[in-house]
Amino acid sequence: MRIASAIAAGGLVLGAAACGEAPEDDNNAGNGAKKYSACMVTDVGGIDDKSFNTSAWKGLQEAQKANSNIDIKNVQSKAEADYEVNLNGFVNQKCDFILAVGGLMSDATKKAAAAHPDQQFGIVDANPGVDNVYPMQFDTAQAAFQAGYLAAGMSKTEKVGTYGGLPIPPVTIFMDGFADGVAYYNKAKSKNVQVLGWDKATQKGSFTNDFVKQDEGKKVSDTLVAQGADIIMPVAGGAGLGTTAAAQASGGKFSVVWVDVDGCESTPNCGVLLTTVVKNIPDAVKEAVLKAAGGEKLQAKPGFVGNLANNGVSIAPYHDFESKVPAELKAEVDKIKADIAAGTITVTSKAQPTK
């Protein structure tokens, strides 16, 4: 599958944000002084998952800062049965823009959107394929490839690990990219660094079956560490905090690659984080809401696919590992970014976003 290079209905560069701090009546939200309401439904991870729900909410907050005529609110889903109820609740409240967060919400969003074809929906990490749902997806395999190469280069045991919350595309795409980055390192350096917890060929691996319970994350990563892994990438939302806490308690026995939001901004365990595979969800959400509030029709096709070329995905700074990562390895990781963005290296995953 070819990498989607699209900067969708506009890249991550905002023109609409320029309306800034003008008096409320002067803000163009399509209807003079009438507020434009942007309403978000979280998945079961909740607003404080330190991951994609947190990121999406930040995007709404940033949109409101850029245009004070935008009203924002959220409702948190406690169970999957809440998704459709919460989405329809916002339809009934006459929200102008309803944002669903996470691949688990795809079916409920598709159903709600089909029932209300004049309602503007948006969704993060899925593409239900409905005209009134604006999909914001992220080719995180590209940045995870960089992280896998980095982890392979930093591992002392020549074993690294990864695990997920559930075997769904927004999770396994990270794991595929990570495994391929390790494989690329092995080929370039004639090494044999092993990936524990995920087999890209069989699409089988380790999962917590939960995005919240930290003890489940700790349990899975403890097993990987016992098998020899000294760097682990959890793709499990808040459950992964069990791994970062265990890494901190281990006194340097193993370190962690975080995902979604720079872990040094979103977790209390910055000191054990080698880097983070970042999805730039805040900018994608902010841009979508600002455009919609300005009267622009959001096109479901092509939607938005974030990649390395348009800064929709990236790896975070090394923070406490800045002095520990060799300069040569840093340069190689940077070159990989340039090569992927240019198409010289092609990163593939069965879970890559479709347009």
Image: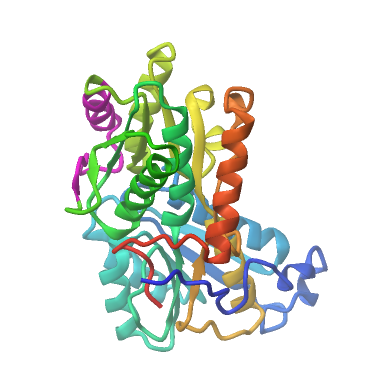
Residue 219 falls within the magenta-colored stretch: yes
Q: Position of residue 276 (x, y in %)?
A: 50, 40
At horizontal 47% and vertical 72% (from top left) the residue drawn is 4
Q: Name the colour scheme.
A: rainbow
Q: Residue furthest front?
A: 190
Quadrant (top left/top right/bottom left/bottom right) for the C terminus = bottom left
Q: Where residue 224 sits in the image (x, y, percent)?
A: 25, 27
Task: Using the image, determine if residue 131 lies above or below residue 211.
Answer: below
Q: Quadrant of residue 49?
A: top left
Q: Is residue 141 left or right of residue 25?
A: left
Instruction: From the top left corner, tell me how far across and down residue 291 is, in percent.
Output: 63, 76
Does 182 lie within the magenta span? no
- Residue at image position (35%, 35%) is 240
Residue most extreme to the right: 22
Examine the image and state in which quarter residue 141 appears. bottom left
Residue 345 visible at all: yes
The answer to whether residue 306 is above or below residue 58 is: below
Q: Quadrant of residue 125?
A: bottom left
Name the residue: 43% across, 88% down: 118
* Quadrant (top left, top right, bottom left, bottom right) of the N terminus: bottom left
Position of residue 228 measured from the top left corner of the image (x, y, whole percent): 27, 22
Left or right: 245 as drawn, with respect to 24: left
Left or right, 74 with reference to 310 = left
Nearer-the-camera pick, 39 or 165? 165
Q: Which residues are magenta?
A: 204-225
Toward the viewer: 49 or 159? Answer: 159
- For the point 25% across and 57% down, the residue is 168
- The answer to whether residue 128 is left or right of residue 325 is left
Along the viewing direction, whichever of 80 and 153 lies nearer the viewer: 153
The answer to whether residue 50 of the structure is visible from this angle is: no
